[in-house]
């Protein structure tokens, strides 16, 4: 299935913010959308330039609940800056014309999910502008449905 | 036998540390050090066939390199700017105060150990006195839900002062290695510039290489490999391994920008393991005879360090125009001394011509670590209470609920 088709089958709301947005505002945006776990940071031209996940925002804003801190976390706790100060600027994006099967196997997708706790994969056009997101929950739903369909056919 | 001993040290250290913390509410480091003492060559270590502690040197060198890397990468330039003048000035005052007090005190006392003159011992102890143990302080802040200007300043200072401590310690090591003042200057210049040069170049290479390594496990391999390689080069080419590892951490953070988390998290998870090793190895060097025969020096070091940092931090904070609540308490709340001090002392055991004095310094630092981790924790609690910041986090939450 092409990614353009996937976006029509599984439409998902992409959360976006500007780099200068405060962490509190970013947290509010994520909390207002029950399914939103990832915030994509856009530059002035609307291109994806960073990613900030719910887990990261929560650990920064609730830092005082941690009983232990690394030195890096100590400094982060008292210099809470903007979204741009904490976003991950190496965002794995996919093109609209790619095939979903190729995407799953060619981009170390699962590794990215596990290590960076990313649940939405941004889909972009040639200018790197955000067109939508592919959600991990939809990928899982699709995989389970496909497995069930195959099992029915074999029976 | 050494491998068996390391395993025994780690498991027994962890067990005693946890038991002591759970049953007697003493800091875990007390258990770690006791485990080390149990396996010293004079006790169980001798029965295991371990007669010397020379084999610990490469372990200490590499693990201290890991700690220096993490200290170097603790803050970015923009975060340093955000910390503000109060924190910077109070940290400088605290570090200078403890260094000068211990240096003058021990120089006036003119304590000479067999292998070094009095001023060398004074310089080494003064450099080690500048460190602080962030873990003990953060634990108290968390336990008593402290919040306020003093707590904020304290968090920044404990993260920053080990940077200065490592720089001072590296410079002191370079200076005492030289035979005269005229040879000391070029040696220090080489130690600094070569260390920074190799560290920054290494940081660039590691950051670029890590981009092609998606798995966390591979990143850990390149990081550890880089730190070990740099430590080895420093030993071969006579530049400071600690400054080099700090420059490596700082430059990795700089080059990686906001994508630096995966280049620090794997090593941060090793930090407690490193500290268990440091404390148990310090215990291995612990000698009751040395401690009892130098009890006066141990008390003196404790008092000079405490007095120097209280006065220094107060002056530094006042210079920056900090409110009284910060300037009058900030030195007092930073008494705990821990893993970095122990690591520095252990490192001295591998410096040529310092064998005897290194043993004395390890014992002074180990004994005062036990003192500062227990009494220092009380002082931190007292200072935060006097500033009225204990329980403020809980009160703030309650107020929000009411409104």
Image (cartoon, rainbow, N blue to C red):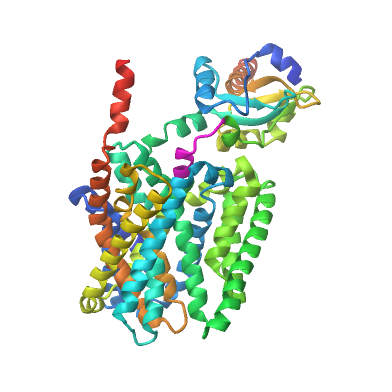
State whether residue B101 is above or below residue B108. Answer: above
Q: Is residue B264 left or right of residue B53?
A: right
- Please give the name of the residue rendered at 44% of the width and 44% of the height, measured from the top-left corner: A74
Residue B63 location (% of width, % of height) = 47, 62
Quarter holding residue B308 = bottom left
**In this picture, which residue range is highlighted in magenta?**
A73-82
Q: Is residue A70 visible?
A: no
Quarter holding residue A48 = top right
Quadrant of the drawing holding the C terminus of chain B: top left
- Please give the name of the residue rendered at 53% of the width and 47% of the height, measured from the top-left corner: B75
Is A129 magenta? The answer is no
Viewer-side residue, A100 vs B27 = B27
- Please give the name of the residue rendered at 42% of the width and 81% of the height, measured from the top-left corner: B354
Q: Residue furthest left?
A: B24
Residue B69 location (% of width, % of height) = 53, 57
Residue B39 location (% of width, % of height) = 29, 70
Q: Is residue B235 left or right of residue A95?
A: left
Viewer-side residue, B229 vs B291 = B291
State whether residue A137 is above or below residue B254. Answer: above
State whether residue A138 is above or below residue A114. Answer: above
Quadrant of the drawing holding the N terminus of chain B: bottom left
Residue B353 location (% of width, % of height) = 44, 84
Q: Is residue B99 left or right of residue B212?
A: left
- Please give the name of the residue rendered at 68% of the width and 56% of the height, measured from the top-left corner: B205
């Amino acid at each position: 299935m092409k990614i353009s088709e996937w976006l029509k089958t599984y439409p998902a709301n992409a959360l976006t913010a500007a780099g200068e947005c405060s962490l509190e505002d970013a947290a509010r945006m994520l909390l207002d959308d029950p399914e939103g776990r990832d915030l994509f940071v856009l530059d002035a031209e609307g291109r994806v330039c960073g990613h900030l996940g719910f887990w990261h925002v929560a650990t920064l804003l609730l830092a005082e609940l941690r009983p232990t801190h690394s030195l890096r976390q100590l400094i982060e706790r008292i210099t809470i800056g903007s979204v741009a100060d904490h976003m991950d600027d190496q965002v794995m994006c996919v093109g609209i014309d790619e095939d979903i099967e190729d995407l799953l196997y060619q981009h170390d997708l699962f590794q990215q999910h596990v290590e960076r706790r990313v649940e939405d994969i941004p889909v972009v056009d040639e200018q790197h502008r955000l067109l939508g997101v592919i959600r991990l929950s939809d990928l899982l739903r699709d995989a389970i449905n496909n497995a069930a369909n195959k099992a029915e056919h074999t029976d | 036998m050494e491998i068996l001993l390391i395993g025994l040290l780690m498991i027994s250290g962890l067990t005693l540390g946890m038991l002591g913390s759970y049953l007697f509410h003493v800091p875990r480091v007390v258990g770690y050090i006791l485990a080390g003492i149990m396996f010293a060559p004079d006790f169980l270590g001798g029965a295991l066939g371990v007669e010397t502690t020379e084999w610990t040197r490469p372990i200490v060198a590499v693990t201290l390199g890991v700690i220096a890397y993490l200290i170097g990468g603790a803050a970015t330039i923009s975060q340093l700017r955000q910390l503000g003048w109060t924190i910077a000035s109070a940290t400088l005052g605290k570090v200078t105060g403890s260094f000068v007090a211990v240096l003058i005190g021990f120089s006036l006392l003119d304590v000479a150990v067999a292998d070094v003159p009095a001023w060398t011992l004074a310089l080494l102890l003064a450099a080690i006195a500048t460190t602080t143990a962030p873990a003990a302080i953060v634990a108290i802040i968390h336990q008593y839900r402290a919040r306020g200007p003093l707590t904020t300043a304290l968090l920044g200072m404990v993260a920053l002062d080990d940077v200065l401590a490592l720089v001072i310690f590296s410079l002191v090591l370079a200076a005492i290695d030289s035979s005269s003042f005229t040879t000391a200057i070029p040696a220090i210049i080489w130690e600094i510039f070569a260390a920074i040069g190799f560290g920054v170049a290494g940081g660039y290479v590691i950051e670029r290489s890590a981009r092609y390594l998606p798995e966390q496990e591979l990143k850990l391999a390149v990081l550890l490999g880089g730190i070990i390689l740099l430590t080895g080069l420093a030993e071969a080419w006579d530049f400071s391994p600690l400054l080099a590892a700090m420059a490596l951490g700082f430059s990795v953070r700089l080059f990686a920008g906001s994508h630096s988390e995966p280049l620090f998290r794997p090593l941060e998870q090793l930090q407690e393991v490193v500290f268990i090793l440091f404390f148990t190895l310090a215990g291995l060097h612990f000698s009751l005879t040395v401690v009892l025969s130098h009890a006066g020096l141990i008390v003196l070091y404790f008092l000079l360090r405490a007095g120097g940092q209280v006065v220094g931090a107060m002056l530094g904070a006042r210079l920056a125009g900090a409110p009284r609540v910060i300037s009058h308490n900030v030195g007092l709340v930073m008494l705990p001394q821990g893993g970095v001090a122990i690591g520095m002392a252990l490192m001295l055991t591998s410096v040529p011509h310092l064998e005897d004095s290194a043993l004395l310094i390890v014992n002074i630092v180990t004994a005062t670590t036990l003192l500062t981790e227990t009494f220092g924790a009380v002082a931190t609690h007292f200072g935060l209470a006097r500033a009225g910041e204990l329980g403020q986090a809980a009160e703030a939450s309650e107020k929000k609920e009411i409104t």
